[in-house]
Amino acid sequence: MNLAVLASGYGSNLQAIINAIHKGEIRANLAVVISDREDAYALQRAKDHGIEALFLNPRDYPGRDAYDRGIIEQLRLRGVDLVILAGFMRLLTPRFVAEFRGKIMNIHPSLLPAFPGLEGVKQALDYGVKVSGCTVHFVDEGLDTGPIILQEAVPVFDNDTEETLHQRIHAVEHRLYPRAIQLLIEGKLRLEGRRCFLGAT
């Protein structure tokens, strides 16, 4: 299976995916890493591992639909089967979702549906929750609203800052995301409506 990762920033989850592929925990080919930001460190991570790194500038396209069509074209050229979002800070258009429905994954630093969108960790701390975590989910047309694949809780300590809580959540993300990807590759994810079941499809 050919994977593509879309990223906008530092790319720590991308690195976890690359590591998992090297260790055989994800049995797939990472065909390309695409970013909407030229300075995204995720692109350098890809280059460091001999993976094609592609910057697509949103300013070169007349709008969101055209930009997403541009990404779709690049994915088709590379025979991409599964799209992985790793800190990609753009909401995908319905056209993109329709093109790869059931084949787009994202990870979010909260126990969805709590605290979707930006700054999920800050939202959780501001609200005063005692337990946070992360969620791997399929992507649909909404903002962090797709069917949930895997979740894991992370305790919130009284002295936590955004940085300390985010560090512990990241550690879980780096383990959970590769597992979810491999489950899909093995055909062990089954969707019924909004519910995602683990087991043979």
Image (spheres, grey):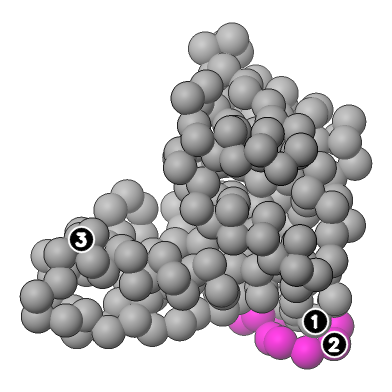
Q: Residue 128: horizontal and vertical position, in percent?
A: 12, 75
| Type of the residue with mark 3 | Glu
> Upstream in the sequence, badge 1 or badge 2?
1
Which region is colored magenta?
A: 192-201
The quadrant of the rendering that contains the C terminus is: bottom right
The quadrant of the rendering that contains the N terminus is: bottom right
Q: Residue 16: horizontal and vertical position, in percent?
A: 59, 60
Residue under label 2, please give it.
200
* Depicted 153 relative to depicted 123: above or below: below
Secondary element at image label 3? helix
Left or right? Give the position of 125 relative to 166.
left
Comparing 159 with 122, the one in front is 159
> Is 69 a magenta residue?
no
Q: Residue 145: horizontal and vertical position, in percent?
A: 48, 62
Instruction: Tell me which corner region of the image, top left, top right, bottom left or bottom right, holds residue 62.
Output: top right
Residue at (49, 69) in percent of width and height: 173
| Type of the residue with mark 1 | Lys
Residue 188 marker: 1
> Is 193 a magenta residue?
yes
Instruction: Tell me which corner region of the image, top left, top right, bottom left or bottom right, holds residue 150.
Output: bottom right
Residue under label 3, please give it.
162
> Upstream in the sequence, badge 3 or badge 2?
3
Instruction: Tell me which corner region of the image, top left, top right, bottom left or bottom right, holds residue 124.
Output: bottom left
Residue 98 visible to an observer of this rendering: no
For the residues bearing labels 1 and 2, Cβ distance under 8 angstroms: yes
Left or right? Give the position of 156 relative to 159.
right
